[in-house]
Image (cartoon, rainbow, N blue to C red):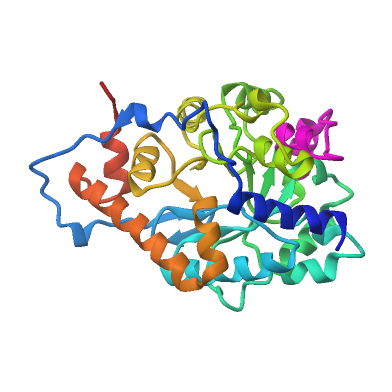
Amino acid sequence: MSLLEHRKRRHIDVCLDGDVAYRGVTTGLERYRLPYNALTQTRMDDVDLSTDFLGSRLRAPVLIGAMTGGADLSGVINRHLAAAAQQLGIGMMLGSQRVMFSSALGEQAATSFAVRDVAPDVLLIGNIGLAQLTKEAVPEIVSALDRVGANALAVHTNPLQEAMQADGDTDCVGSLDRLHEVVPMVDRPVLLKEVGHGIGATAVRELLLATGEPPVAAIDVAGAGGTSWSRVEQLVRYGELRYPDLADWGIPTAQALLEVRAALPRIPLVASGGIRTGSDAAKALAMGADVVAVARPLLAAAIDSVAAVTEWLQMFLTELRVCLHGCGATNLAALRGLGVVGAS
């Protein structure tokens, strides 16, 4: 097993069995509540959760978040997740495809991302790191997307995670320029995302500095409050938490969502990072997200079976539907029109 494969498998093991959640930071969603309507005039069965995102129609505003790839177990996980996404009509984001760029591992690694046979209609979003987004790599990136049948590409920026990782990519100089230069060369929509430490107002100001317009088609704020990848990498690298303050560093999901939506009122946004319930999702959608993404809560189920993943997601979607019904919203546009109120 290569060092990269070993790290991917360790990620899975630590996320399954380790204490990887934020300790001193929450998503901030608990500070808001949905406006309950005791005289709702909706019929719950008629509540419409469908939406369009990155050119695809989803039956519900949910993505299975980026999780894994490259290790043997990753293939099982990804296929179970993709089959559940197909059944429910939601989207899926793959884990980092960087491992496919290795000449020694590319063919073997590619099989762990091969899900189109079980999910022919799913919005499938490929994934690479910002460090790998270069002009020279564009043909390789497009080839990796073609091989898995991806409709779009997520580019993840994760300086804190990389700083905690053995041999991580810690040279971020020029990454913004490359984002502006290379994104137009990719032949499908590009989404910019964090991995769980948040994209907020500061990052958006940097993003808009060159042209006044974001170079990407969508942003996943991926805020703090769920899984801390600084914590994960410390446990993988050292077997212990050496830098506890860094494990709790990030922009809470609610704050990140509000800051990015205020700066970019029209760009499609994904809310992820600690979205654990349908109520969390409803709040995030009411606050301006177009879709939400869920990852780690599905990991154990994805190792088990398609049925286990589907059951978890169906409960999540039922709660989301109840939230719209209880607010008096027949669809997502109506929910966003209602907004949220601060919890007393």
Q: Is residue 316 above or below residue 223?
A: below
Tally of marks: 0
Residue at image point 67% right, 69% down: 75
Q: Out of 305 and 208, give the one closest to the viewer.
A: 305
In the image, taking residue 225 as reference, residue 32 lies left or right, namely left
Task: Give the residue at the far right of this rendering.
Answer: 103
* Residue 300 in the image, given as x and y percentages of width and height: 53, 60
Point out the stretch of residues depicted in magenta. 158-182
Q: Out of 123 and 77, give the one closest to the viewer.
A: 77
Residue 27 can be seen, yes or no: yes
Residue 171 shown in magenta: yes
In the image, taking residue 32 as reference, residue 52 lies left or right, namely right
In the image, taking residue 234 as reference, residue 310 lies left or right, namely left
* Residue 112 in the image, given as x and y percentages of width and height: 71, 68
Residue at image point 71% right, 41% down: 235
User: In which quadrant will I find the N terminus?
Assistant: bottom right
Q: Is residue 327 above or below residue 123?
A: above
Q: Is residue 244 above or below residue 282?
A: above
Residue at image point 76% right, 34% down: 164
* Residue 94 in the image, given as x and y percentages of width and height: 64, 58
User: In which quadrant will I find the C terminus?
Assistant: top left
Residue 96 shown in magenta: no
Task: Give the residue at the far front of this rendering.
Answer: 240
